[in-house]
Image (cartoon, rainbow, N blue to C red):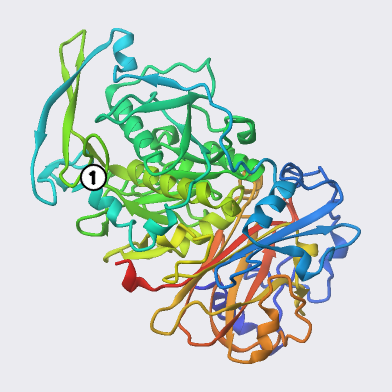
Amino acid sequence: MKKKIALMVAFGCLGASAASVHYDILGRKGSKMNSPMVYKNVDYTKTQKQKQEKVGSSLETRALQRTGMGNNVAAIEGSFRSYQSNNRFSIKRHYYSNPDNCNNSQCSYNWNGYKSRANEVFIRVNEDFDVSPNYETFDGLTHSEDNGIYTFSWGPSYEEGGSVHPYLPSPFSADQYILYMPSSRLYSAWLRRGYTDVLKRTPSYTGAYMSADALPVTMDGYPVKYVRTDGNETFNPTPGYEVRDSWTYYFLGALDATVTYVGKKIEYGDPASKTPQVYVGVRNDRMGKGSSSSYSSLAKSLDNFIYRYRTIEIVPAGNYGVDGTTTQGNVCKIGQAANAVTVGAIDPVSNKIADYSSTKNYDMGSRKPEIYNYTHAVVGAPGIYRPMWYGIRRVYTQNSSGREFVYEPVVYGTETAAALLASLVNATLSYNPFYRWHPEVVKAFLLTSDGRAINPPYPPNTAMKTGPSIPYVYFDDQGSNTHFDYDSRYWNGSIDNLKTRTDDDGKKEIWFVTKNLGTSTKPASAAISWLSSGTDIANIGHIPQDFDLSVYGSNSSNYERYLDPHAKLDGLNFDNPGEYIGGSFLSYNSYEKVTIASNYKYLIFRISMFSEDDRSENKGQVVMGFNMASADKQNYN
């Protein structure tokens, strides 16, 4: 039930005098508690000792400083829009002494100007890869073989024609089989119109971190180059882990200029200290050590890492959908991380969510998984673009017993879905530095990158009813692709500096106006996502901040002057901004998403801080991203 409807139901019996404003047992406005004890004349803000907001006093402030802002900067906001040919990028800083430090023309830049200014604002946005990392290259021998436990050989090659592979036994369920699709067709679910134009440009190198139980080895002729993150780490994997982690590595760097760092740790040090910098991480399910019905220490650690360093972490949901236990279907422990993007698995043949894919989080956790992506592929050699697929089996022989472990050239599971998504995201960052250091924006645009529809049945709490499509996230920085549009924004720092206004109930709001990128028959999608510290989530028991997203529409030409992302909204009628189109009002969640089926020319968005827990060590700080994308699906399905 949407929370505002729930509040109306809960308080409906209190009478008209309590209908407009609600209080909890401590007298706080806007509480979601249904308590009979309310104090309507108490100003709780004056009875509670407030935390003193000091620069350097919280994880958030340290994170703001490390992204290039000095002690006198309270907040920063930025935007990237497809529907303006010039000055499509903007950055605006809010200083404690002068919260409105620049006019509109001083905040907006063309592409080259943005990249130049971005280097002033953020630490080291690399556009060129000018320092060779210390690659360690392997020729196909396994590390398992080196320690004398296993011997290795290529098995017999096998090749079959046709568009799909025959059924093979499922590794997740007894007496069940999986129908695999050639990896070239799996990629073709992404590589729709617009991909060729994007790849004409030269990407910059970016770093990616892969947590693994095994170092990657040559699989199916694909070369292996990687950088260890810690020379003291040792790997003594079983063959299964080695194969899984090698395929993860294979897909992570399959599309673009990626340097992959491999390690075993959740927190692997400062990503900016690597060359090239690490912007994207992918974590395998085994690191999660099973599923859980409560917020885990692993999730807390990853949430804190993302909150501090702003990397984009992609995590498999886990393969616990058919485990038959009391935790059936829960995401893996590290997949609970609210700030990460948790990925479920789609069967590319049926286009349904795979039966084994985990599909739920603990009761007060953010809804997981946010994204579903493709898996079940046969990988061709030597590359992923062969018109006919074939593969070579990988055979391990255990030296002590002579037992053979045979691995077909197939990939499966939520680990594959996560690796493919991480590859897509890393490729996006290679071409467009706007999204680097902004996991809050990346999650929002993934939530709106609607591609192929997922067939029912899907879980009722699934925010994403479609799989991600690469043209939606390969944002064209030259604006030459007319088949889709987007509007991306972020707000980081003090909510008091970023807010547009405070409403009559004391809720702080951010308002802005955009062009409508969709129609009533081809609706646009919009989403917001925000970060929280893992310490706050662990201490409070849920996401400490709760935001709502609402959208209104109008055809009035008066709204044209508000299209600049930093325009003053003087004259906007906040009580009646236009016709209400829709909204999203989830509780204890880290994102909201709304579908906009409307023909209005202008859209007016309201982001409202519905509540904020006073126990948060980062009270008053916001790390929020927004994205709206068009939905011209006829070009992508």
Residue drawn at x 70%, y 47% is: 119
Q: Position of residue 163 (x, y in %)?
A: 13, 52
Q: Position of residue 469 (x, y in %)?
A: 38, 60
Residue placed most toward the observer, 457 or 415? 415
Residue at the spot of label 1: 377
Residue drawn at x 29%, y 29% is: 243
Residue furthest to the bottom in view is 556
User: Is 301 rendered above or below residue 499?
Assistant: above
Q: What element does badge 1 sit on?
A: strand
User: Is 134 rendered above or below residue 508?
Assistant: above
Q: Quadrant of residue 631?
A: bottom left
Residue drawn at x 58%, y 36% is: 277
User: Is 367 rendered above or below residue 284?
Assistant: below
- Report whether 17 appears left or right of 311: right
- Report whether 449 appears left or right of 267: left
Residue placed most toward the observer, 533 or 478? 478
Q: Which quarter of the rendered picture does the C terminus lie within? A: bottom left
User: Is 206 rendered above or below residue 399?
Assistant: below
- Residue type highlighted by circle 1: Ala
Instruction: Confirm whether residue 203 shows in the render.
Output: yes
Q: Position of residue 43 (x, y in %)?
A: 84, 70
Q: Position of residue 218 (x, y in %)?
A: 30, 25
Q: How many marks?
A: 1
Instruction: Confirm whether residue 461 shows in the render.
Output: no
Residue placed most toward the observer, 277 or 397? 277
> Within 10 angstroms of label 1, few (less than 14), some, or many (20 or more) residues?
many
